[in-house]
Amino acid sequence: MGFCFSPTIRSVSKFTSCTILLVFLLSCTSFTATEAYDALDPNGNITIKWDIMSWTPDGYVAVVTMFNFQQYRHIQAPGWSLGWTWAKKEVIWSMMGGQTTEQGDCSRFKGNVPHCCKKDPTVVDLLPGTPYNQQIANCCKGGVINSWVQDPANAASSFQISVGAAGTTNKTVKLPKNFTLKAPGPGYTCGPAKIVKPTKFVTADQRRVTQALMTWNVTCTYSQFLSQKTPTCCVSLSSFYNDTIVSCPTCACGCQNNATQPGSCVEADSPYLASVVSGSGKNSYTPLVQCTKHMCPIRVHWHVKLNYKDYWRVKVTITNFNYRMNYTQWNLVAQHPNFDNLTQLFSFNYKSLTPYAAINDTAMLWGVKFYNDLLMEAGPLGNVQSELLFQKDKSTFTFEKGWAFPRRIYFNGDNCVMPSPEDYPWLPNAGSHPDISLLTLFMTILSAMAFLYAYA
Ligand SMILES: *[C@@H]1O[C@H](CO)[C@@H](O)[C@H](O)[C@H]1NC(C)=O
Ligand SMILES: *[C@@H]1O[C@H](CO)[C@@H](O)[C@H](O)[C@H]1NC(C)=O
Ligand SMILES: *[C@@H]1O[C@H](CO)[C@@H](O)[C@H](O)[C@H]1NC(C)=O
Ligand SMILES: *[C@@H]1O[C@H](CO)[C@@H](O)[C@H](O)[C@H]1NC(C)=O
Ligand SMILES: *[C@@H]1O[C@H](CO)[C@@H](O)[C@H](O)[C@H]1NC(C)=O
Ligand SMILES: *[C@@H]1O[C@H](CO)[C@@H](O)[C@H](O)[C@H]1NC(C)=O
Ligand SMILES: *[C@@H]1O[C@H](CO)[C@@H](O)[C@H](O)[C@H]1NC(C)=O
Ligand SMILES: *[C@@H]1O[C@H](CO)[C@@H](O)[C@H](O)[C@H]1NC(C)=O
Ligand SMILES: *[C@@H]1O[C@H](CO)[C@@H](O)[C@H](O)[C@H]1NC(C)=O
C-alpha cells in the first residue's frame, strides 16, 4: 500500500502494475485499522512500557512510560489520555505524575480509600506547576509529548501507579487489557500487553545498573483513517514564471455556512472577533478560523521563487488562520524528489526522513527554538517562513508539468489538501495546456486515493 503511494514510481510498467494493484485493493473495500498506517513513517508507534519497581503486600508499584517513537507526529494540548481494563478486581491506591479522570465506586473500602476503583480507569497527565512531591521524571506536561525527531528529550511521558488487589509475584500478576490511547481524539489502536525483558536502569554516575522486577510493553499505532478528522490544512502554490496563484481548494477543510453553523468562522475585521478572542472561549480547543474559501486553520504556501543555473529556490510560508491556537513545536513534512539534493535551508530546522531506505525525497522541517518554533494565532504575526535552495539534477529537473511543486505536505502529522494538478501554474511558453501527463494522472489517482483512504 505504502509503496503505491510513493511518487517514485517512474517507469510506465511499474505505474501500470501499481494502478492494477490500487484497483485491486480498492475492490477489496475493507480497509482495516492495521492497514491504514502512515506511509511516510511506517515504523512510527507509541510504546507504553510498564516497569514493576516493587511488590507490595497486595500488589505492586509500577512506572508507566509512553515513548513517542513517531518521527513527526506529536501529541498537542489538551494532551493524551490512556485507558485500560483490569484483568481482575485491581484498584489504584495512589498515583504520582498522573491521575485518573474518575474515582469510581470505592464503597467496598473502609478507612483508606483508593485513588480509583474503576474496572476501566482513564489516566491523564498532571499539569505543569504540579507540586514537586507529586511529580516523577517525565511527568506533568499537560499530556503533551513531542515527536522523536523534533525533541527526543521530551518524547516520553511517565506516571507512577500503586496497584492493589493484584498479583504480588511475577507468576500471579495479570496484565491489564484493552488499552486505549486518545491524543486527545481517536486515531490510535493499541495491541495487547506483552511481557518483555525487564528494563535495566543505569544510575546517573553510570556505576550501577538496576532492573525492573517485571516489564510489559504495549504498542499503539496511528491511522489518519481512524482519526476521522476533517482536514486541518491545505496547500497553495505560485511561481515566478506565472502570475497565477493557485489557492487552496475551496471548502478544503469545510465550507462557510452561517445558516446552519453560525459563527463557524469570523471575518478578520469583525468586532465580534475581539470579544471571542479575549473572552471565555479563549482556552477552547475547537478552532475558530478566519473566514476563507478553504476554511482551514493552516495554509502552507509553496512559491517557486528563483531559477539559477545550477540551483533553484523555493519559499515556504505557513499561515495560521486559527484565532484560538498558538502552535508550539509545529512541524512540516514535505515530499519532493529534489529533497535528495537540498543544499541550504534558511531559518528552519531540517531532517531528511527516509521511510524506505533507498528513497530520499521526504523532509521534515520545524522551527528554530526561541525564533520561530511558535506559530502565533491568526493575525499579523500568525505566520512563519523559510527558503529552500535545491541543487538541480540536470537529468530530472524541469519546471514543466508541476514538477517543482511538492507531492505531499503534512502539518503536525496531518495530510494537507493539495490543489488539483490541472490547476498548477504552467510555463508561459508551454504553448497549450499540457495533456494529461503521466504525472498528472498519477497525482490525480494519488489524491483521490489519499482522500478515500483518509476521510472515507
Ligand atoms: C516501535 O518503534 C520503535 C522505534 O522506531 C521500533 O524499534 C519498534 O520496532 C516499533 N514497534 C513496533 C511493534 O512496530
Ligand atoms: C519471575 O521471577 C523469577 C525469579 O523470581 C524469574 O526466574 C522469572 O524469569 C521471572 N519471570 C518473568 C516473566 O519475569
Ligand atoms: C475496550 O475498551 C473500549 C473503550 O473503552 C470498549 O468500548 C470495549 O468494549 C472494550 N473491550 C473489551 C473487550 O473490554
Ligand atoms: C519495550 O519498550 C521499550 C521502551 O520503548 C523498548 O526499549 C523495548 O525494546 C521494548 N521491548 C520489546 C521487546 O519490544
Ligand atoms: C458568519 O458569522 C460570523 C459571526 O457572526 C461573522 O463574523 C461572519 O462575517 C459571517 N460570515 C459570513 C460569510 O456571513
Ligand atoms: C498566543 O501567544 C501570545 C503571546 O505569548 C499570547 O498573547 C496569546 O494570548 C496566545 N494566544 C492563544 C490563543 O493562546
Ligand atoms: C538524503 O539527503 C540528505 C540531504 O541531502 C543527506 O544528508 C542524506 O544523507 C541522504 N540520505 C540518503 C539515505 O541518501
Ligand atoms: C546533487 O546534484 C549534483 C548535481 O546533479 C550531483 O552531482 C550530486 O550527486 C547530487 N547529490 C545527491 C545526494 O543526489
Ligand atoms: C499560468 O498557469 C495557468 C494555469 O494554472 C494558465 O491558465 C495561464 O495561462 C498561465 N499563464 C501564462 C502567462 O502562461
Image (cartoon, helix red, strand yellow):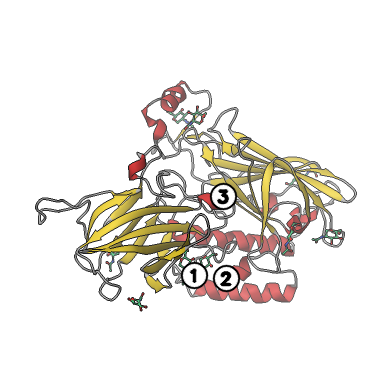
Q: Earlier in the sequence, mark 2 or mark 1?
A: 2
Q: Is mark 3 on a helix, strand or loop?
A: loop
Query: Which residue sits furthest front?
Result: 207
What is the three-letter code of the residue carrying label 2? Met
Density class for disc 2 (Cα within 10 Å; few <14, some 14-19, many ≥20) is: some
**Mark 3 vs mark 1: in front:** 3
Tell me, yes or no, whether the two marked residues, 3 and 1, touch with CB atoms within 8 Å.
no
Reading the image, the residue beneath label 2 is 1
Label 1 packing within 10 angstroms: few (<14), some (14-19), many (20+): few
Q: Which amino acid does label 1 sit on?
A: Glu
The residue identified by callout 1 is: 35
86 or 358: which is nearer to us? 86
Camera-side residue: 180 or 233? 180
Q: Which residue is drawn at 48% across and 62% down?
A: 208
Provide the residue designation for mark 3. Answer: 151
Asked if residue 102 lies left or right of residue 201, the reply is left
Q: How far apart are marks 3 and 1 (CA)?
A: 28 Å
- Identify residue type, mark 3: Asp
Left or right placement of residue 412 versus residue 393 in this view: left
Of badges 3 and 2, nearer the viewer stands: 3
The number of numbered discs placed on residues in the rendered structure image is 3
Element type at marker 2? loop
Asked whether mark 2 lies closer than 8 Å to ligand 1, one says no
Picture disc at residue 233? none
Where is residue 38, by image quadrant?
bottom right
Looking at marks 3 and 1 on the same chain, the residue that comes earlier in the sequence is marked by: 1
Assess whether mark 1 and mark 2 are in contact (beta carbons under 8 angstroms): yes
